[in-house]
Image: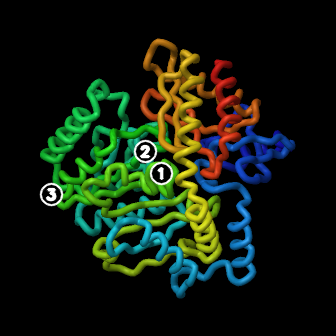
Amino acid sequence: MTKDLFARHRAVLPDWLALYYENPLEITHGEGRHVWDAEGNKYLDFFGGILTTMTAHALPEVTKAVAEQAGRIIHSSTLYLNRPMVELAERVAQLSGIPDARVFFTTSGTEANDTALLLATAHRRSNTILAMRNSYHGRSFSSVGITGNRGWSPTSLSPLQTLYVHGGVRTRGPYAHLDDRDFIDACVADLKDLLGHTRAPAALIAEPVQGVGGFTSPPDGLYAAFREVLHERGILWIADEVQTGWGRTGEHFWGWQAHGRSGPPDIVTFAKGIGNGTSIGGVIARAEIMNCLDANSISTFGGTQLTMAAGLANLNHLLEHDLQGNARRVGGLLIERLRAAAAQVPHVREVRGRGLMIGVELTRPGTDEAAPEAASTVLEAARAGGLLVGKGGGHSTSVLRVAPPMSLTVAEAEEGAAILERALRSI
C-alpha cells in the first residue's frame, strides 16, 4: 500500500517536495504523543508535524470544538463579522505584550511573514530588509527573498533588498570564539557598520531560535541590543515566532522575551502550534503599523471559523494545563539526558536548545564538517526504533531536530531519549 502511494505521489507532485526516509511512511492517525503508519507501526512523535501538533494528537478539546463548529458553519471569509476570530484575536492581543495590538489571521507562517514584510515596507516606505544569516521565513516569493539558508532558497530574485546580519548562530562564524558579552558587542558593531552603508531599512526580521537552521540561537539579549540601535533610526523589529511561540522554549511564552530588555517587537508573526494541525498563522502589530495600509484587503481563509474554533480550544488547553511549565521541566530533563548520551558519540558536536526545542548537531568526528549522511542514518535508525525526529541545519551543518508535543511526559521523554541514544550509536 505504501509503495503504491509513493509511486502515485512521485507521478503527480513536484520533485522538490521533500520526503523523509528511504521508504517514506504514511501517518494515518495519532493520539497524545504517538502516531501510527499505514502498516500499523506505532511511533513516539518527537517532531509533531514540524512543531505544529503543539499540545497532542487528537486532543479531545480541539476535536470537539472543530466538530461542533463544522456542524454550524465552516467558513464565511473576513467580509463578515466572525465571533471565533474576534475571540481568538482578543486572547492573542492580550498575550502578545504589544501595546494597542491588532491581529490579522493568515493560513500559514509563510503568509504571516509575507504580511509582516508588507506592513513594514509600507509603513517605512523602504524595501530594504535586514535578516539573519542561517534564517528561514517561508516559501513565498518575498519570504524566500529574506531567507538566509541556501538549502531553502531556490532563487536570488526578490522584490526586496536583503542585507544579512551576524548573530543568529552562537557556535559558528567569525565571532564564535568570543564570550557572550563580547559576541553581542561584536554583532552590534557589525550592525551599526552595515547601517552606515545602506539606505534606512524597513525592518529587521529574526527568529529568536532559528528553526529550520537547526535550533540555533544567540545569547540572551542580542536582539534587545539590536533593538536599541534600530529604534534610534526608526527601523522596525519583526520577531518570527512561528516555531518559538506559545511557550515551547519553556522559559518564556514568546521567544523574543529572552531579548525583552528594550521592549517588545513592533511586529510578531505566529503560526504552526496555535492551530494544533489546523491552518492558522497571523501577525500582531501596534495599531499604528497594522493600520498603515491605504488600500482594501481581505483574507479569504485567514480567520475561518473552523480553524479559529480549533485555535481557541487549543490555546485554552495549553494555558489551563501549563504546558509552558511542562516544556521547561520535561524539556530540561530531555536535553540533559541527550547530552549524557551524546558524550559517548564522536559524531555529536553539540546538543543545544530550550524547553522542547532541542537540536543535536552532527559532524564528522574531530572536525566541524557537517555529516548529513550521519543525520540520515540516525533518522532511519530512530524510525526503526519507534521514534520520529526531524532534520535541519544551515551552512555546513547537519542537525537532528527534537520538538515533541508540549504535553510530553517524563516517561515518554526517557523512552525517546533511549531510542535516540541507540540510533546515535548506530552511526
Type of the residue with mark 1 = Thr
Report the disc number at residue 232: 3
Q: Residue furthest bottom?
A: 80
| Residue 120 in sight in this render | yes
Please report whichever mark, 3 or 2, sits nearer to the chain's N-terminal start.
2
Distance between the Cα atoms at labels 1 and 2?
7 Å
Picture mark count: 3
Most distant residue in the top direction: 366
SS class, disc 2: loop
Residue 313 location in percent, x, y? 63, 69
Q: Which residue is mark 2?
A: 209
Q: Is residue 268 left or right of residue 333?
A: left
- The reply to whether callout 1 and callout 2 are in contact (CB within 8 Å) is yes
> Between disc 1 and disc 3, whose residue precedes?
3
Mark found first going from the N terminus, 1 or 2 = 2
Q: Quadrant of the N terminus?
A: top right
Q: Quadrant of the C terminus?
A: top right
Distance between mark 3 and mark 2 Cα atoms? 25 Å
Q: Which mark is residue 111?
A: none
Q: Which mark is residue 244?
A: 1
Find residue 277 and report its horizontal and vertical position in percent.
64, 59
Contact between labelled residues 2 and 3, with CB atoms less than 8 Å apart: no
Which SS class for mark 1?
loop
Q: Residue at x 68, y 67 (%)?
A: 62
Badge 2 density bin: few <14, some 14–19, many ≥20, Cα 10 Å: many
- Left or right of 359, for residue 210: left
Q: Position of residue 360 (x, y in %)?
A: 53, 30
